[in-house]
Structure formats: C-alpha cells, structure tokens
Image (spheres, rainbow, N blue to C red):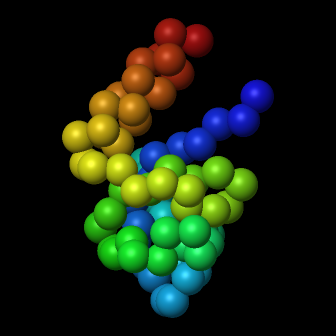
Amino acid sequence: MCLAIPMKVIEKNENIGKVQTGNVTYDANFTLIPEVQIGDYVLIHAGFAIEKLDVAEAEETLDLFREMYEKQ
C-alpha cells in the first residue's frame, strides 16, 4: 500500500527543499508542482510533492492520521 502524507513546506530552493509534519522533517522534490511556496501544504509521496493542499484539508487529514495512531 502506498501512502502520501500532508506536509508543510518549510524550505525551498528552486525544485528542492524541506517539508515538515510534527517533529519530522523530510527532503522533498517540487518538480511536479514548482509553484509551491514556503508555508504551503503538499502531499509527499516517495520524496516528491505530488499535490498542493489547502490548509483545512491538510489539517483534517493530519488529524485523521493522529486519531488512527492513538487507537493502536
């Protein structure tokens, strides 16, 4: 099963940068959606930003992930 995780863009230099969720920071490639800016939320899959999300959608998805984790 593949999973894409919503993460916030915290650093960007051309088509590469860093994204973060919680205490996790990850390198990301923005080639597929080069218009993203610092502060945007994106879906990250296999190191690539594959979709830009609005803040409400990203936070809702992250809340669902937290709920699932807490129920383990």
In the displayed structure image, the side of residue 2 where residue 57 appears, left or right: left
Q: Nearer the viewer, residue 33 or 15?
A: 33
Residue at 34% x, 42% y is 58
- Indicate the quadrant where residue 67 lies: top left
Q: Position of residue 48 (x, y in %)?
A: 63, 62
Q: Position of residue 71 (x, y in %)?
A: 50, 10
- Indicate the quadrant where residue 10 lies: bottom left
Q: Residue furthest right?
A: 1
Q: Is residue 10 above or below residue 23?
A: below
- How many discs appear? 0
On the rendered image, what quadrant is the N terminus found in? top right
Residue 63 shows in this picture: yes
Q: Position of residue 21 (x, y in %)?
A: 45, 51
Residue at 56% x, 56% y is 50
Residue at 52% x, 21% y is 69
Q: Nearer the viewer, residue 49 or 32?
A: 32
On the rendered image, what quadrant is the C terminus found in? top right
Q: Nearer the viewer, residue 10 or 48?
A: 48
In the displayed structure image, the side of residue 46 where residue 25 appears, left or right: left
Q: Is residue 5 above or below residue 9?
A: above
Q: Position of residue 2 (x, y in %)?
A: 72, 35
Q: Is residue 49 above or below residue 61?
A: below
Residue 18 shows in this picture: no
Q: Is residue 36 above or below residue 5?
A: below
Q: Residue furthest top?
A: 71
